[in-house]
Amino acid sequence: MDVVFPVLHGTFGEDGTVQGLLKLADVPFVGAGVLGSAVGMDKDVMKRLLRDAGLPTVRFLVFERSSLEDVNFERVTQALGLPVFIKPANLGSSVGIHKVKDGNEFERAVKDAFRYDNKILVEEAIQGREIECAVLGNDNPIASLPGEIMPRHEFYSYEAKYLDDKGAVLEIPAKLPDEVVKQIQEIAARAFKVLCCEGMARVDFFLRHDREVIVNEINTIPGFTKISMYPKMWEASGVSYTELIDRLIQLAIERFKREKKLKTSFS
C-alpha cells in the first residue's frame, strides 16, 4: 500500500499505538506521529506543554489512582471553584466526562472517570463560546477559518455528539471579529507545533467575553465525514473535501521520505 489514512478514534487509534505499528511496518501514514499522537491523547501532558509554552489554557488539577486520598472536594473547589469538569486524562468523545456542581456529584464523577483511566483531570468550568479551528501541514502548518459549536445540552457531551441529532448547532465559519479570527488561527498553529503534531489536527477553544481565547484541547484525528467540523471548516476556507484528502496524503508521503533519509544507527 502507498499510505495509510487512520480514521480511528480513542484508545489504540489515536494515542500513538497504531502510529508506532505503522512506523515499524515502514508504511507512510496520515496525521501525527507517535509522540504527537500520545501527547494529544493525554490531556494532562498536553495542557502542561501548552501552559509551559505560554498559551492560554484552562486551570486544572491532576489526580492519580495511586494517590486517591488526595482527591478532595474542598481542595478542588478552593482551587477551581464550582462547577468543575471531571474527565479521564486519556480518552475521547467526551466519554467519562461529568460537569460537577456539588459534593455528591463530585464523588460519583471521580469514581466514573477512574473507570477509564488511572489518571483524571479536574478542570475549571469556562463560561463562553465553544470555537474550533482546523490545522493542516507539517513544518509550516496553516489554520482554517474557525467554526462554532452551540450545544443544546448542558455541555457538548457524548449524547450531544452522537446520540441526539439535534444535540448541537454548528456555525461555519463562526461569527467573529477579524482580529479574533486571526488570534485563534495563530494560537491554533502554535499549539499544533508545541504539541509535536503533523498532518492534521483540530484545536478546540473557549472564547470568554467574546475576546479572551483559551485553548481547551487538540484532536489529532478529528471526525472526517463530509459533515464533520474539520473538513467543513476547510471547505469554508476554500479547500474542498477531495483537495483536503489529497493534501493530507501528500503530507504523509513527504514526511515519510524525509524520515527515511535519517540515520538510525552507526552502521
Image (cartoon, rainbow, N blue to C red):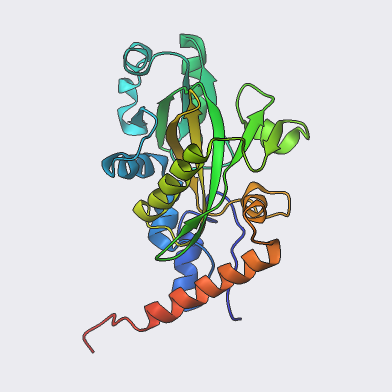
Q: Residue furthest right?
A: 165
In-image side of 148 versus 204 (left or right): right
> What residue is rendered at 46% in x and 29% in y?
211
> What residue is rendered at 49% in x and 32% in y?
206
> What residue is rendered at 35% in x and 21% in y?
71
Q: Where, by quadrant of the figure, is residue 164 drawn?
A: top right
Q: How many marks?
A: 0
In the rendered image of this protein, does residue 164 appear above or below residue 39?
above
Q: Residue furthest left?
A: 266
In-image side of 227 versus 245 (left or right): right
> What residue is rendered at 36% in x and 28% in y?
60
Residue 40 horizontal/vertical position (percent):
44, 49
Residue 195 horizontal/vertical position (percent):
37, 52
Please state which of residues 99 and 212 is positioned toward the viewer in this rendering: 212
In the rendered image of this protein, does residue 243 appear above or below residue 89?
below
Residue 248 horizontal/vertical position (percent):
57, 67
**Camera sees residue 139:** yes
Q: Residue furthest bottom?
A: 267
